[in-house]
Image (tube, rainbow, N blue to C red):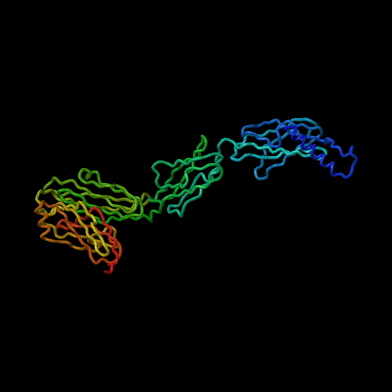
Amino acid sequence: MKTRHIFAIVAVAALTAGLTGCKSDEELAAKPAKEVILVEEGSSIVMASGDMTKDVKIRANCAWKMSLIQDANNPWDALIVQPAAGNGDGTLVIQSDQNTAIYDRLDTIMLTTDGGLQQKIAVRQKSGDPTINISQKTMSFAANPLGAQLLTINSNDGWNIVTPAGIDWLHIDKLTGGTGAQSVNVSVDPATTDVGRSTSFNINYGTSTAEVVVKQNGMSSDDVYLHVNTSELNMSGGGGEQMLYVESNAAWRAFVPSSAQSWLWIEPAQGVGNGEIRVRCEPNQSTERERMSLIVFVAGNQNPKQFDVLVQQGTYTTSRDSVNSQPVIQHFELMHSQNNFAEMVFMVSGMTADVEDYGLVYSQRNQSPALDNSERRSAFDQQQLAEIINRGGSGELWGFMENLQPGTYYVRAYVRTKSGVVYSPNVVTVTATAQENP
């Protein structure tokens, strides 16, 4: 390396001499340069992030001065180089603090002789241990957010995001990344209560972790609404099941008072938005006294909305024709639909002589159709009912919908007795189209 630098300087001197004009052979002969300056380690010096001192040997046959040329985009303020001048051979002492940044630090040392000969030395200190810069350490969202927020992660090492377990309302579109600046979209679902919520996620890099906190405001209490399709359920003394349909724009919960928890059951006991609850009663063993209770629905916390459903159960009887015995629709299914026609079947148990009507109830607007808010198509057939009763009160019933206008229909099966109306536990959706031309 030493020979290469000296040769380069001598060659330049010889070329310069050749351009001075006509000279004698003695004058044209190559002569050594008057000034020589050489850096033993070459024109590029690399320091580790933890190197705070480095010695650099200088070979020179003349006086020289040292100056620093800083990188304006990434100033290296802690860099100190001594001495500022020398004569002949010497040693440059480079001093700095530890580089903990995510970027390398770079400056240039310039050595200049009295005769104007210059030697540049590029000094680079490598970036430090794994580090990370995060554009936001706390992210705040409105109850009804307009969209995702951008999180910029700038690191000198690879990283990965660990999301909290059991938090399904937080969404992050990118969970791993490498060096440099990278963007991550963070979004949240609309709030479902009038109470704010918060969580956090961790960004792991190297052996360290950075935490980002996510907060969301709760919805206004005035905006919370709650409604249940009926305020009263009449249950058979022999027990059975019925469905309740909840309409809400928030998280809701339902409960039964402890005094009725031995005979009245609900499932599920909570939900978000529109939903349904299965209500089940154990047989009333009393033959003389009816029983009743409330199912209480609540949505919101700051200013809760409440809806009560009264459940009344008749006395127990083994007589099949008792007015207190209610049938149960065990299954309801769409069997076939084409154009403006649909065919459905439902299985019923507990059919007795006090059945007044049965069939289908449907609506294009109400997703929980009932007799008091929708249209119906009665399928009452006394002969069919008699056959079902003779088979022990259980049987298969068929319902048809014909000449439907194009559109979507929500359909439920129903059985109406002297004691009340029983609906199928599920709603079937039928899509009707225009009749095809033959």
In this view, which residue lies farthest toward the right? 24
Q: Is 84 left or right of 426, judged from the image as shown?
A: right
**Which one is nearer the viewer's eye here, 362 or 264?**
362
Q: Which percent across, then down, holds residue 241?
A: 20, 50
Q: How many circles with numbers are drawn on the protein? A: 0
Can you name the residue that lies furthest to the bottom here? Answer: 437
Q: Nearer the viewer, residue 7 or 329?
A: 7
Viewed as shown, does residue 223 lie left or right of 98?
A: left
Quadrant (top left/top right/bottom left/bottom right) for the C terminus: bottom left
| Residue 333: quadrant of the picture | bottom left
Q: Residue at the spot x=47%, y=51% of the render?
A: 148
Residue in the foreground of this view, choosing between 175 and 284: 175
For residue 400, above or below residue 37: below
Q: Quadrant of the N terminus?
A: top right
Q: Determine the residue positioned at 49% across, 42% down.
A: 176
For residue 57, above or below residue 374: above
Residue 43, position in %: x, y? 71, 37
Give the left or right position of residue 78, taking residue 425 as reference. right
Between 71 and 406, the one nearer to me in the picture: 406
* Drawn side of residue 206 relative to residue 83, left or right: left
Question: Image height check: is 163 above or below 356?
Answer: above
Q: Position of residue 22 (x, y in %)?
A: 89, 44
Residue 269 screen position, x and y as percent: 29, 47
